[in-house]
């Protein structure tokens, strides 16, 4: 079947064919779903919110911890009945579990039509066209590691968005001992900076004002053509006309260079937020995790960042119960949290991942103790987040309004420069613009304020 034929298949008498995405895991996966949705929309296939309305169901999976991986399997299982009821329904599994398990998924769930690995997302249209012309199942998990990302086909974004992710680097070379990412997303591959700036310019032409540079480890970016590093890339992007705000995610503390720190001083459009995973507050554990810094290095970098950008919000990732983590190591984690006063933290119980270096260590912290430590971390973080949110009261922030508030349709929701959710009274006409808001109330997960008239 050719691209034209897929286009014809995409249109039926009852309207366009439709695709439903169920996405697990990180922003990388969210972005991959967005890319597949955009590529399929060129074939006339539209996205829907319910699997019951869909002709294609894509389950985009995550294997970073055991729990989301298990959820993936029960999710795939859930669609068997639907497949039996609806003739021609296409079911696909993509993402990290697809990459890792490949054929095994089709053996376990024979009604799955396609399994697409992390480096094959760009082939979605071709694969769907092969499936609807009768070839199935298709398992495509080839993994070519070279030092450059293959050119991206531009894809249509959601027209309701004012903010967009742009991939700058894929994969990871760090091999943190607990992490499966280098095995399922491969070695680091940067994208040529001209491809990145071209994509950003075209997004701005469609009304996007905020860009989030995306990668597993953005600050080890290096242009494969000329060696240009991440701080220079940000400088280049900041000069593009029409860009209001630049964000990036995720950074590694060991690659937080002086040059990148100075970007926060020089570049006003660089958002006052950094996500910098500390993982643990014990030097013994950080070393066993193969992270390449000490707690002291980490705190020093945060202090230097805050000295050039006083209102910088810092968020982090924390793992509790890594093998060998004793009570004093755990107290080190609580102490680094108190010292840095993180604005927010994602915290996880250590989960052994097959094939990683840490899987060779004895998983010796009991499940109950992991749960207890996680609860302590989350309680402490709740207090620190509230403290940080309370500090924002009476300050005025520029908020990029992105939509109607879910709870109250007379309110608009958006994000401040510090990446905090801010709700305020307003009308739909504010959506897509930047609004000065004076913060009046602080909650656990958001702020509330009033628009300041200029
Ligand atoms: N167990 C628990 N948490 C993990 N993470 C990555 N691998 C594991 C694992 N095996 C967490 C880290 C990382 C975040 C994306 O997920 O904190 O920063
Ligand atoms: Fe995993 Fe470490 Fe790479 Fe992050 S930096 S993706 S934790 S190996």
Image (cartoon, rainbow, N blue to C red):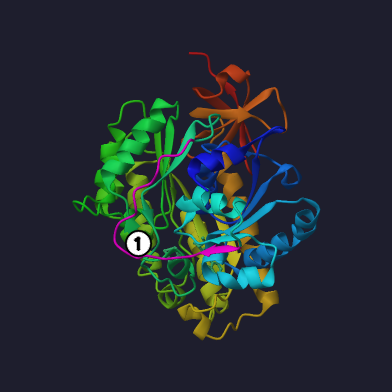
Visible in this render: residue 277? yes
Magenta residue span? 137-156
Apparent side of residue 30 relative to residue 250 in the rendered image (left or right)? right
| Magenta-drawn stretch, dominant element (helix, strand or loop) | loop
**Percent x, y of residue 399:** 51, 29
**Percent x, y of residue 414:** 56, 31
How many numbered badges does the structure rendering display? Answer: 1
- The correct choice, above or below, for 176 with respect to 389 in the image is below
- The correct choice, above or below, for 281 with respect to 398 in the image is below
What residue is at 51 percent from the left and 51 percent from the top?
124
**Percent x, y of residue 315:** 49, 51
Q: Which of the two residues, 47 or 194, is positioned nearer the viewer here?
A: 47
Q: Which of the two residues, 196 or 105, is positioned nearer the viewer here?
A: 105
Apparent side of residue 424 relative to residue 126 in the rendered image (left or right)? right
Whether 141 is among the magenta residues is yes
What residue is at 53 percent from the left and 70 percent from the top?
100
Visible in this render: residue 45? no
Secondary element at tag 1: loop
Whether 452 is among the magenta residues is no
Name the residue beneath numbered marker 1: 188
**Percent x, y of residue 222:** 26, 54
Ligand 2: image quarter: bottom left
Q: Which of the two residues, 183 or 141, is positioned nearer the viewer here?
A: 141
- The correct choice, above or below, for 318 with respect to 385 in the image is below
Asked if ligand 2 lies within 8 A of label 1, the reply is no
Q: Residue furthest top?
A: 454
Please rate how many residues cluster around mark 1, counting C-alpha atoms within 10 Å: few if below 14, some from 14 to 19, many from 20: many
Apparent side of residue 250 relative to residue 78 in the rendered image (left or right)? left
């Amino acid at each position: 079947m050719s691209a034209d034929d897929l286009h014809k298949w995409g249109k039926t008498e009852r309207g366009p064919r439709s695709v439903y995405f169920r996405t697990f895991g990180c922003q990388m996966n969210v972005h991959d779903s967005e890319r597949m949705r955009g590529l399929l929309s060129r074939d006339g296939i539209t996205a829907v919110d319910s699997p019951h309305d869909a002709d294609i169901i894509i389950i985009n999976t995550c294997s970073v911890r055991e729990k989301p991986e298990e959820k993936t399997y029960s999710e795939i299982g859930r669609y068997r009945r639907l497949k039996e009821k609806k003739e021609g329904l296409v079911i696909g599994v993509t993402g990290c579990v697809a990459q890792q398990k490949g054929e095994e998924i089709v053996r376990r769930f024979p009604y799955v039509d396609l399994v697409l690995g992390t480096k094959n997302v760009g082939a979605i249209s071709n694969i769907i066209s092969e499936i609807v012309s009768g070839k199935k199942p298709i398992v495509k998990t080839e993994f070519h590691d070279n030092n450059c990302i293959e050119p991206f086909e531009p894809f249509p974004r959601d027209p309701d968005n004012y903010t967009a992710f742009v991939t700058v680097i894929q994969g990871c070379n760090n091999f943190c001992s607990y992490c499966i990412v280098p095995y399922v997303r491969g070695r680091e591959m940067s994208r040529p900076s001209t491809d990145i700036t071209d994509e950003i310019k075209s997004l701005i032409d469609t009304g996007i004002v905020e860009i989030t540079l995306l990668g597993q480890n953005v600050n080890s970016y290096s242009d494969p053509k000329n060696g240009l590093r991440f701080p220079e890339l940000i400088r280049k992007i900041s000069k593009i006309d029409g860009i209001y705000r630049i964000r990036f995610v995720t950074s590694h503390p060991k690659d937080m260079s002086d040059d990148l720190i100075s970007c926060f001083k020089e570049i006003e459009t660089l958002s006052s937020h950094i996500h910098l995973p500390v993982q643990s507050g014990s030097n013994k554990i950080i070393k066993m995790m193969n992270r390449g810094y000490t707690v002291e290095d980490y705190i020093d970098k945060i202090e230097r960042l805050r000295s050039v950008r006083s209102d910088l919000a810092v968020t982090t990732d924390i793992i509790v119960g890594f093998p060998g983590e004793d009570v004093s190591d755990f107290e080190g984690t609580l102490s680094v949290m108190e010292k840095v006063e993180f604005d927010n933290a994602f915290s996880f119980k250590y989960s052994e991942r097959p094939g990683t270096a840490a899987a060779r260590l004895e998983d010796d912290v009991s499940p109950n103790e992991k749960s207890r430590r996680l609860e302590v971390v989350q309680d402490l973080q709740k207090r620190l987040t509230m403290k940080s949110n309370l500090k924002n009261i009476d300050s005025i922030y520029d908020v990029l309004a992105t939509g109607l508030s879910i709870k109250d349709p007379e309110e608009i929701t958006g994000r401040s420069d510090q990446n905090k959710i801010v709700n305020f009274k307003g009308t739909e006409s504010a959506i897509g613009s930047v609004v000065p808001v004076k913060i009046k109330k602080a909650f656990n997960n958001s702020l509330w304020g009033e628009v300041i008239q200029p």
